[in-house]
Image: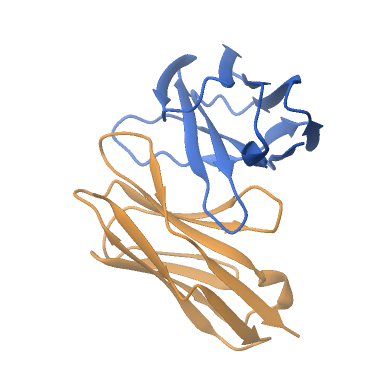
Chain colours: A orange, B blue
Amino acid sequence: EDQVTQSPEALRLQEGESSSLNCSYTVSGLRGLFWYRQDPGKGPEFLFTLYSAGEEKEKERLKATLTKKESFLHITAPKPEDSATYLCALVRPSGSRLTFGEGTQLTVNP
Amino acid sequence: DTEVTQTPKHLVMGMTNKKSLKCEQHMGHRAMYWYKQKAKKPPELMFVYSYEKLSINESVPSRFSPECPNSSLLNLHLHALQPEDSALYLCASSPYRSGGADTQYFGPGTRLTVL
């Protein structure tokens, strides 16, 4: 059975304090791994898709990386507006179902 | 443009009411999805339409009835809901690429409260 585990559940950072969020997964055949950002009461906002181990993608202060067992979302010099829940999800080759992790709630204090 | 729109933003209904949620996308995507999300939990898949045909129904109770009138529109008809159905209902769409990871783009959601 596919499993996605995100850690930590919650993370508090000071503005400018860089850190990483972890997404560990087990799946028989990974088609893609996705990162989303979700603000309270809103729909998830797509950030990145990673397809294969060794791949990296960047967007502003965010950088996502992928290995065969986990993905990291690195946040460099975060700002308060980066506060949100970050969701990791994967899709198998067999279909379009996303398997989500429980998310990491990030709070960046000014 | 990666916009999925949903109406209404908020909906309050009684257990005997009939209401509908609407979702629209103009990205030419051929797959559309309904999700239900409870507080502090990830989205849970309810239904998937691919090429306007229902392809996945995640054993959702019949009080939820999806409809896909055309490739741009997706409705969710609600009838005789229970208070535990109160949640954020999310619509998503994706290109439906065969052989590749299909990125899903989510709408802003409809906050549903059942009294």
Q: Nearer the viewer, residue A9 or B61?
A: B61
Q: Nearer the viewer, residue B49 or A76?
A: B49
Q: How many marks?
A: 0
The quadrant the C terminus of chain B occupies is top right
Residue B88 seen from this side? no
Looking at the image, residue A105 sits to the left or right of residue B11; the answer is: left
- The answer to whether A43 appears left or right of A98 in the picture is right
Residue at x 74%, y 21% (from the top left corner): B16
Q: Quadrant of residue A4?
A: bottom left
Residue A75 percent location from the top left of the image: 54, 76
Which residue sits at x=65%, y=32%? B82
Image quarter in which the N terminus of chain B is found? top right
Foreground: A21 or A32?
Answer: A21
Question: Which residue reaches farthest top?
Answer: B69
Residue B100 location, quadrant: top left
A19 over A2 or under it: above or below = below
**In the drawing, does residue A43 fall left or right of residue A46?**
right
Residue A100, can we see it?
yes
Question: Residue A91's spot in the image, x, y percent?
Answer: 34, 45
Q: Quadrant of residue A16?
A: bottom right
Above/below status of B30 relative to A49: above
User: Residue A36's spot in the image, x, y percent?
Assistant: 53, 56
Question: Which residue of the protein is positioned furthest toward the left in this rendering?
Answer: A28
Residue B45 at x, y percent in the picture: 47, 37
| Rendered residue at 63%/79% (across/down) | A78
Above-or-below relation of B99 to A64: above
